[in-house]
Image (spheres, helix red, strand yellow):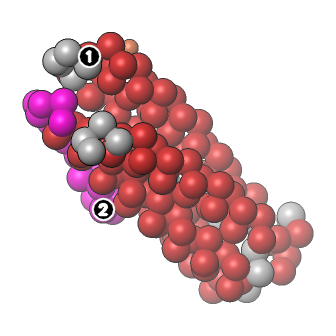
Amino acid sequence: MGQTERILSVDSKKELEIGLNQSIAELVVTTMMAQNFHWNVTGMAFGPLHELFQKIYEDHFLAQDELAERIKAIGGHANGELGKMVKDSKVLESDGKSDDRSMIKMLAEAETTVAATLSGVAAQAEKSGDLLTQDLAITRGQVHEKFAWLLNSHLR
Ligand SMILES: [Fe+2]
């Protein structure tokens, strides 16, 4: 058992498990959204957008694993069921049949949502004295806010 698991109360552990699983669910839907847009984007900015969307889904795929393994490190259960993730996620799926501007807008909104959920997890973790989960949630939240900024900058 890791040191964090030893100091966490049963309630705190459960709360963090729920928050981290919620972050992963939203991240998974956002990952697929970025890949969907990578495939289907069109227009004069095709090249850079095709690349940016790829950079996003590659980052997010690795982040799913980091967050899930943090749940395991504190003794929880990492949900790996796609159907449940889609159901739980506040980020909604897209059919990928939108113009480039709408894609950017949707993905930026998704990044903002994931950042907000992670910020909530960081606050929970701080309250529970779990500084290591707090650090991970903050670091990842910052990455998602940065992607939101990168995306939104196309629209200003
Ligand atoms: Fe590709």
Amino acid at dot 1? Phe
Query: Residue under circle 1?
Result: 46
- Which of 100/29 is in front? 100
Is residue 44 among the parts visible in the rendering? yes
Q: Check disc 2: other Cα within 10 Å, few if <14, some if 14-19, many if 20+.
A: some
Label 2 – label 1 distance at C-alpha: 28 Å
Is residue 56 placed above or below 152 in the rendered structure? Answer: above
Q: Amino acid at mark 2?
A: Lys
Location of residue 4 (image quadrant): bottom right
**Residue at the (33%, 45%) spot, across then down:** 152
Q: Which corner quadrant of the figure contains ligand 1? A: top left
Residue 151, position in %: x, y?
36, 40
Q: Quadrant of the C terminus?
A: top left
Asked if residue 64 lies left or right of residue 102, the reply is: right
Where residue 14 sits: x, y (%)? 59, 77
Label 1 secondary element? helix
Give the number of the disc on residue 90. Answer: 2
For the N terminus, give its image quadrant.
Answer: bottom right
Look at the image and give the residue range highlighted in magenta.
85-101
